[in-house]
Image: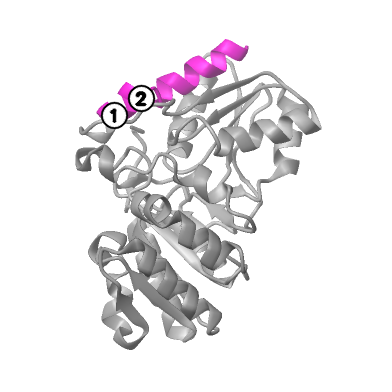
Amino acid sequence: MSSRQMGPPTRDAFGERLAELGKSNDRIVVVDGDVADSTRTKEFFNQFPNRAWNVGIAESNLVGVGAGLAAAGKTPVIASFACFLLCNAYDQIRMGIAFPGLNAKLVGSHGGISPGEDGPSQMAVEDVALACALGGFTVIVPADSESTKALTKAMIEHDGPVYMRTGRPDAPAIYDTEPDVTLGRAITVREGKDLTIIANGLMVAEAMDAAEELAASGTEARVLDMHTVKPIDEDAISKAALETGRIVVAEEHFAHGALGAAVAMVAGRRGAVPMAFVNVGDSYSTSGQPDELFKDAGITTADIVAAAKSLL
């Protein structure tokens, strides 16, 4: 994984900001699937015990309770492991939240393969694709601690259903302070004219490392933190295609249906360019250290550099 300075996990930043927001917004309530220590909603439970409920290991019921709270005018944050939440309760999310367009916020921790030793049963590698397929949903994948804080606030303030993925491991720092975020608008974290690397989550740090390695050989890569996969920033993608002529997409997710697919759809419609994709492919991972799993899956800095060079 990235050699950049490490910061707290994105799940920690989410839990911290959620508890802070609860002090000034009494409409926020939390329902958790008996994993509050892991999702980091535990601080909200500690501070606001009358506004938080442990539904137990029953994700379909979890979503149903959250949907009912949303229908009653609350702003529910529905939290569990990403794979449990999206895979186990998809029908309830679709019918109970997406179909009526309720103002519910789903937060899935342990996204991607970086949970490492927890093993593939705990790893969400389809969650972003599943969330993007839900009508009316906004889908967010923060890169680091500071951006997670800002995006948690933006998620709560947004009127409508949202899915946000958070992670278990320490996240390499991208931002020194909280960035100014707007849902649906990418952040340019590095300028470049020769190609653009579009990434989200932990892959933003890998993209930054790759850009620095490419710069050493004379190739200047632009790096976009595409924290919102849906709605995606079409203008930033079109501008990248026009100004840099090549795009690499890097994500900690299966190859199909998530960031790469969304970028390719925009590029194909608004100005096709040569593209390369760095992702976990189409097979499940195994247990191990996150850096070992990143290497095995082919989503390291070296893989991004190789993808970039294939386009040059």
Position of residue 303 relative to residue 31, above or below, is: above
Quarter-of-image position of residue 160: bottom right
Q: Work out which quarter of the rendered image holds the C terminus and state it.
A: top right
Q: Which mark is residue 305?
A: none
Q: Work out which quarter of the rendered image holds the N terminus and state it.
A: top left
Who is closer to the viewer here, 230 or 211? 230
The residue tagged 1 is 293
Give the SS element for disc 2: helix
Q: Which mark is residue 297?
A: 2
Residue 131, percent from left and from top: 52, 50
Check contact, mark 1 vs mark 2: CB within 8 A: yes
Would residue 17 be visible to someone looking at this image? Answer: yes
Indicate whether residue 304 is drawn in magenta: yes
Position of residue 14 relative to residue 117, above or below, is: below
Residue 103 appears left or right of 149: right
Which residue is pictured at 71% across the width and 25% down the height? 244
Residue 81, percent from left and from top: 33, 54
Q: Main secondary structure of the magenta part?
A: helix
Which residue is pictured at 43% across the width and 32% down the height? 206
Position of residue 232 relative to residue 294, above or below, is: below
Q: Amino acid at mark 1?
A: Leu
Which residue range is magenta in the image? 292-312
Residue 275, percent from left and from top: 63, 21
Give the SS element for disc 1: helix
Would residue 177 be visible to someone looking at this image? Answer: no
Q: Amino acid at mark 2?
A: Ala
Indicate whether residue 144 is drawn in magenta: no
Q: Check disc 1: other Cα within 10 Å, few if <14, some if 14-19, many if 20+.
A: many
Spatial separation of the CA atoms under disc 1 and disc 2: 6 Å
